[in-house]
Image (tube, rainbow, N blue to C red):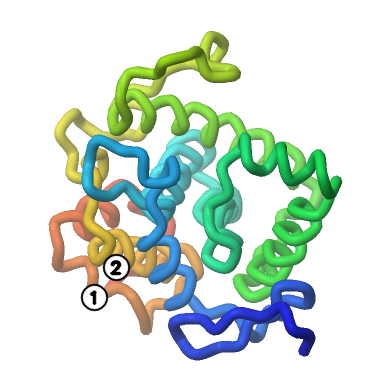
Amino acid sequence: MGPNWIQTAAGVAFDLQAPRAEDVRAVDLAHALAGINRFGGHLRVPHYSVAQHSILCAVLLWQRTRDRLATTAALLHDAHEAYTGDLKAPLKALINAAAPGVIATLESGIDAAIYAWAGLELGQGAADVRRLIKTADLQLLFWERDRWMGRPTRPWVGEAETIRLTPADFGLVAGSPLLNPWPATEAEAAFGLLLAMLLSDLGSGLHGTDTRIGRELVAAFRGVAREVR
């Protein structure tokens, strides 16, 4: 192992330059992503996490495709941030200008390890799934901004062309707890629950079904798991 590794919440030494599937842990993904605020923390609410963003992206993909693999890919589309943190797009652009390809290589390597750990193989439909996730991710960006940030001082790239989401797009009613910001502890539990459902790992995570968010999550993803005990 080289010098560029981090210690995870589960006590794993995770090598950033040579990530391995066997070093990925569900608890690390859920805990770290739940603790990272979207938009660098520049929010009007105390906490809105990458974990919740990822769950809502998965909700959109499930509504649009009813495909387990595409939905799992949506849940994990930012999972590398559990190890890299959430680098904002303008910062990524600056880094890429100075060191082209470095961030993309880092993230793609970690993504590959996470996908291998999850047994996620998209096959010939991979390009279509990536396109659907990119669309949902961009729509969520503006839905989140408009709800949780202050009024923008300048137009954001892409906002004029992006369709605005409504609760119906999530298959939810207005006021659903899934659409309100969650504290980190609830986001961590919800991410673990949904990951367990999608991977059919019924021995872990499903204790969260006794919470209001957990019950809403199970209802939103009805049919995604073979069974939920």
Q: Which mark is residue 207?
A: 1
Mark 1 or mark 2: which comes first in sequence? 2
Q: Which mark is residue 4?
A: none
In the rendered structure, the answer to whether residue 139 lies left or right of residue 126 reads left
Binning the other alpha carbons within 10 Å of mark 1 as few (below 14), some (14 to 19) or many (20 upward) gives some
Q: Amino acid at mark 2?
A: Ala
Q: Secondary structure at mark 1?
A: helix
Q: In the rendered image, which quarter contains the N terminus?
A: bottom right
Mark 1 touches mark 2? (CB < 8 Å):
yes
Depth order, front residue of 188/41: 41
Asked which quadrant contains residue 204, the reply is: bottom left
Depth order, front residue of 128/136: 136
Q: Amino acid at mark 1?
A: His
Q: Which mark is residue 189?
A: 2
Q: In the rendered view, tell whether residue 23 sits above or below residue 195.
A: below
Q: Position of residue 175 (x, y in %)?
A: 15, 34
Q: Position of residue 196 (x, y in %)?
A: 42, 70
In the rendered structure, the answer to whether residue 43 lies left or right of residue 135 reads left
Q: In the rendered view, tell whether residue 109 sits above or below residue 59.
A: below
Asked which quadrant contains residue 30, the reply is: bottom left
